Amino acid sequence: MNTEKVAKVMADALDAKLAPPEEVDLDSLIDYDLIGFGSGIYSGRHHKALLEFARKLPSQKKEAFVFSTCGKWIKNYHEGLLEILKQKGFIIKDEFTCSGWDTYGPLKLIGGIKKGHPDAKDLENAHVFAKSLIN
Protein backbone atom coordinates (compact mmCIF):
# COMPACT_ATOMS: atom_id res chain seq x y z
CA MET A 1 0.00 0.00 0.00
CA ASN A 2 3.09 2.27 -0.04
CA THR A 3 2.67 3.36 -3.63
CA GLU A 4 -1.07 3.75 -3.19
CA LYS A 5 -0.43 6.36 -0.47
CA VAL A 6 1.80 8.30 -2.87
CA ALA A 7 -0.68 7.89 -5.74
CA LYS A 8 -3.56 9.23 -3.60
CA VAL A 9 -1.55 12.32 -2.64
CA MET A 10 -0.68 12.95 -6.29
CA ALA A 11 -4.27 12.40 -7.44
CA ASP A 12 -5.53 14.86 -4.82
CA ALA A 13 -2.92 17.45 -5.83
CA LEU A 14 -3.88 17.08 -9.50
CA ASP A 15 -7.62 16.71 -8.89
CA ALA A 16 -7.27 13.49 -10.86
CA LYS A 17 -8.88 10.08 -11.02
CA LEU A 18 -6.93 7.16 -9.55
CA ALA A 19 -7.40 3.68 -11.02
CA PRO A 20 -5.53 0.38 -11.13
CA PRO A 21 -4.57 -0.79 -14.65
CA GLU A 22 -7.26 -3.48 -14.80
CA GLU A 23 -9.99 -0.85 -14.30
CA VAL A 24 -8.84 1.58 -16.98
CA ASP A 25 -10.77 1.77 -20.23
CA LEU A 26 -8.02 2.31 -22.82
CA ASP A 27 -10.38 4.30 -25.05
CA SER A 28 -11.07 6.78 -22.22
CA LEU A 29 -7.43 7.91 -22.06
CA ILE A 30 -8.08 10.25 -24.97
CA ASP A 31 -10.01 12.43 -22.49
CA TYR A 32 -6.95 13.14 -20.34
CA ASP A 33 -4.16 15.67 -20.86
CA LEU A 34 -1.73 14.10 -18.37
CA ILE A 35 -1.50 10.45 -17.33
CA GLY A 36 0.50 9.06 -14.41
CA PHE A 37 1.93 5.55 -14.33
CA GLY A 38 3.23 4.15 -11.08
CA SER A 39 3.74 1.11 -8.88
CA GLY A 40 6.08 -0.31 -6.34
CA ILE A 41 9.35 -1.73 -7.61
CA TYR A 42 9.53 -5.53 -7.71
CA SER A 43 12.79 -7.26 -8.63
CA GLY A 44 14.10 -4.08 -10.21
CA ARG A 45 11.05 -3.04 -12.24
CA HIS A 46 7.50 -1.75 -11.99
CA HIS A 47 4.77 -4.26 -11.23
CA LYS A 48 4.16 -6.65 -14.13
CA ALA A 49 0.48 -5.64 -14.35
CA LEU A 50 1.49 -2.04 -15.02
CA LEU A 51 4.07 -3.06 -17.62
CA GLU A 52 1.53 -5.29 -19.38
CA PHE A 53 -0.99 -2.45 -19.33
CA ALA A 54 1.55 -0.05 -20.85
CA ARG A 55 2.31 -2.53 -23.64
CA LYS A 56 -1.41 -2.66 -24.54
CA LEU A 57 -1.79 1.11 -24.80
CA PRO A 58 -2.57 2.53 -28.21
CA SER A 59 0.00 4.94 -29.60
CA GLN A 60 -0.78 8.53 -28.63
CA LYS A 61 0.86 11.89 -28.08
CA LYS A 62 -0.04 12.42 -24.42
CA GLU A 63 1.97 13.88 -21.56
CA ALA A 64 2.79 11.38 -18.84
CA PHE A 65 4.73 10.99 -15.63
CA VAL A 66 6.14 7.92 -13.93
CA PHE A 67 6.45 7.25 -10.21
CA SER A 68 7.40 4.48 -7.83
CA THR A 69 8.25 3.49 -4.29
CA CYS A 70 11.07 1.14 -3.49
CA GLY A 71 13.08 -0.17 -0.58
CA LYS A 72 16.45 0.74 -2.00
CA TRP A 73 17.16 2.92 -5.01
CA ILE A 74 20.28 1.54 -6.65
CA LYS A 75 19.57 2.14 -10.35
CA ASN A 76 16.98 3.70 -12.59
CA TYR A 77 14.10 1.29 -12.11
CA HIS A 78 11.90 3.42 -14.36
CA GLU A 79 13.84 2.63 -17.54
CA GLY A 80 11.65 -0.29 -18.68
CA LEU A 81 8.36 1.54 -18.25
CA LEU A 82 9.76 4.74 -19.75
CA GLU A 83 10.93 2.87 -22.83
CA ILE A 84 7.48 1.34 -23.37
CA LEU A 85 5.72 4.67 -22.93
CA LYS A 86 8.09 6.52 -25.26
CA GLN A 87 7.60 3.84 -27.93
CA LYS A 88 3.86 4.48 -27.62
CA GLY A 89 4.41 8.21 -28.23
CA PHE A 90 4.03 9.50 -24.68
CA ILE A 91 5.89 12.66 -23.75
CA ILE A 92 7.43 12.12 -20.31
CA LYS A 93 7.16 15.26 -18.21
CA ASP A 94 9.00 13.96 -15.15
CA GLU A 95 9.66 11.08 -12.75
CA PHE A 96 9.26 10.65 -9.00
CA THR A 97 10.37 8.01 -6.55
CA CYS A 98 10.52 7.72 -2.81
CA SER A 99 11.26 5.12 -0.20
CA GLY A 100 8.70 2.48 0.57
CA TRP A 101 8.78 -0.14 3.28
CA ASP A 102 10.09 -3.24 1.53
CA THR A 103 9.31 -6.63 3.05
CA TYR A 104 9.71 -8.68 -0.10
CA GLY A 105 11.41 -12.09 -0.11
CA PRO A 106 14.42 -12.40 2.20
CA LEU A 107 13.79 -8.90 3.57
CA LYS A 108 10.84 -10.35 5.49
CA LEU A 109 13.33 -12.21 7.67
CA ILE A 110 14.85 -8.97 8.92
CA GLY A 111 11.61 -7.03 9.19
CA GLY A 112 12.08 -5.18 5.93
CA ILE A 113 13.92 -1.99 5.08
CA LYS A 114 12.78 1.63 5.03
CA LYS A 115 10.15 0.90 7.69
CA GLY A 116 7.77 3.80 8.14
CA HIS A 117 8.07 5.00 4.55
CA PRO A 118 6.58 6.66 2.75
CA ASP A 119 6.52 9.10 5.66
CA ALA A 120 5.02 12.58 5.92
CA LYS A 121 8.04 14.15 4.19
CA ASP A 122 7.85 11.63 1.32
CA LEU A 123 4.15 12.39 0.87
CA GLU A 124 4.77 16.14 0.95
CA ASN A 125 7.44 15.67 -1.72
CA ALA A 126 4.93 13.70 -3.81
CA HIS A 127 2.40 16.52 -3.44
CA VAL A 128 4.94 19.17 -4.49
CA PHE A 129 6.04 17.00 -7.42
CA ALA A 130 2.45 16.55 -8.64
CA LYS A 131 1.72 20.27 -8.37
CA SER A 132 4.87 21.00 -10.39
CA LEU A 133 3.44 18.98 -13.28
CA ILE A 134 0.66 21.53 -13.81
CA ASN A 135 2.52 24.75 -13.06
Image (spheres, grey):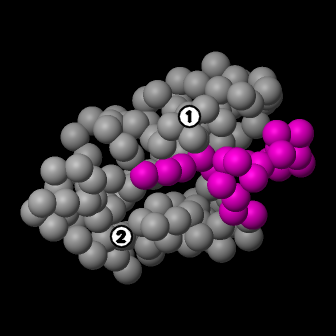
Residue position for label 1: 51
Horizontal side, residue 35 vs residue 6: left or right? right
Q: State the residue lying farthest toward the bottom.
A: 120
Q: How many marks?
A: 2
Dot 2 amino acid type: Pro
Pointer 2 and pointer 1: residues touching (CB < 8 Å)? Answer: no
Q: Relative to 41, does residue 100 appear above or below in the rendering?
A: below
**Residue 46: percent from the left, percent from the top?**
45, 41
Q: For the magenta stretch, what is the residue range?
A: 17-40
Q: Nearer the viewer, residue 109 or 30?
A: 109
Q: Nearer the viewer, residue 129 or 119?
A: 119
Residue position for label 2: 118
Q: Relative to 135, does residue 124 appear above or below in the rendering?
A: below
Horizontal side, residue 128 vs residue 36: left or right? left
Horizontal side, residue 107 vs residue 133: left or right? left
User: Marks 2 and 1: which is nearer the front?
Assistant: 1
At x 47%, y 61%, the residue is 3
At x 38%, y 46%, the residue is 41
At x 43%, y 52%, the residue is 40
**Residue 130: percent from the left, percent from the top?**
58, 62
Element carrying mark 1: helix
Element carrying mark 2: loop
Instruction: State whether residue 93 appears in this view.
Output: no
